[in-house]
Structure formats: C-alpha cells, structure tokens
Image (spheres, rainbow, N blue to C red):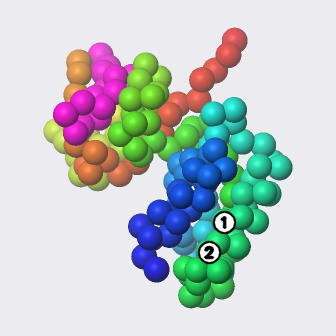
Amino acid sequence: MQKKEIEALVEALLAQEGAELVDLRYAKEGPKWVLRAFVDKPSGVTIDDCAYLSDRIGGLLDSEKAIERSYVLEVSSPGLDRVVKKPADFQRFAGRRINVRLRLPENGQRNFHSVLRGFEDGGVVLEDEGGRRRFALDSIEEARLEPEVEI
C-alpha cells in the first residue's frame, strides 16, 4: 500500500477511538524499518493510550497486509513542538508561535519564526516584524509549533 492509503486506514481507526493522526513517518533506521504514528486527542494522549492505539493500529495494518516488510511500530503524542500539517490545524493553532521551513527559499529565506494567523485562501498566514506573509500549503516542508513556556 502507498503511504496515503496507510494514512487513510490509520485515520479512520483513530477517528473511531476519538483520536487524530497528526503525522505518520516511515523510514529505514539502521537495519530496520520504523513506522511512527503521532496521535492526539482533545484531552491529550497518555502512555496507556499509546500502548492501546499501538495494538489497534498494528493489528489493522497486519490484517490489511498494508506493509510488506517487517517494521517496528511506534505510537506517541505529537510532543510540545507538534507538527502542523492540515489546514484545520493551522486555523486551530492561530495565535501560537510557529517555525516554518519552506521547500524552496523565498527571497533567500527558508525558515520563518512567526506568529501563526491561520489558514486563508489555500495558504498558511504568518505574521512577524516583517509583516504578514502567506505561503501555499504545498510550499511548506515542515511546520512546528513552538513550545509554550510557563513562567
């Protein structure tokens, strides 16, 4: 199966469990392949949630024969520096500080550390001392929230 098909399977399963798929990464690390699923729930994700969802996801992928080679499945929370990928998440986290890396430089710059203003007209809107900028979603290589620090 292709990555998009695997993502769709996992997203459907997680929706039944009241959770969402934040990111899915499949890579070779040394001699083994690792599939990492980053999941979240409105109330947050516990270690017990990760163990339970790992069993559910692993069982589904095995029963569907979704991945042909052997792999290690890791399920975890998205962490404090959560990846942001979906238009709805760019809206949801508006007002938060975000780090964005573009696939190709714009005016000689690939990395932006800005305030996320949302998602409008098919683009991610950022604001910093340089003003407002809008980037097409497919021009973004990676976007991560900056951890909120409590004092």
Amino acid marked by disc 1: Ile
Residue found at the far right of this picture: 48
Q: Position of residue 36 (x, y in %)?
A: 61, 62
Quadrant of the rendered image containing residue 78: top right
**Which residue: 60% across, 59% down?**
13
- At x 64%, y 44%, the residue is 18
Callout 1 secondary element: helix
Q: Residues within 10 Å of mark 1 (few under 14, many from 20)?
A: many
Image position of 26 with respect to 82: above or below? below
Q: Is residue 64 magenta?
A: no
Residue lying furthest left in this view?
Answer: 107
Q: From the image, which quarter does the C terminus lie in?
A: top right
Residue beneath disc 1? 57
Residue lying furthest front: 16
**Left or right of 97 on screen, residue 37:** right
Judging from the image, what secondary structure is the residue with disc 2 in? helix
Q: Is residue 127 magenta?
A: yes
- Which portion, as a residue range, is magenta? 115-130
Residue 138 tag number:
none
Q: Main secondary structure of the magenta part?
A: strand
Describe residue 27's horizontal placement relative to residue 62 as left or right. Answer: left
Amino acid type at mark 2: Leu
The residue positioned 29% from the left and 16% from the top of the image is: 129
Seen in the image, is 30 located left or right of residue 98? right
- Residue 4, how many percent across, how many down? 41, 67
The answer to whether mark 1 and mark 2 are in CB contact below 8 A is yes
Check disc 2 and report the residue beneath it: 61
Q: Pointer 2: residues within 10 angstroms few (<14), some, or many (20+)?
A: some
Left or right position of 128 against 46 = left
**Frontmost residue, 94 versus 20:** 20
Residue at 72% in and 42% down: 45
- For this rendering, which residue is in front, 54 or 145? 54
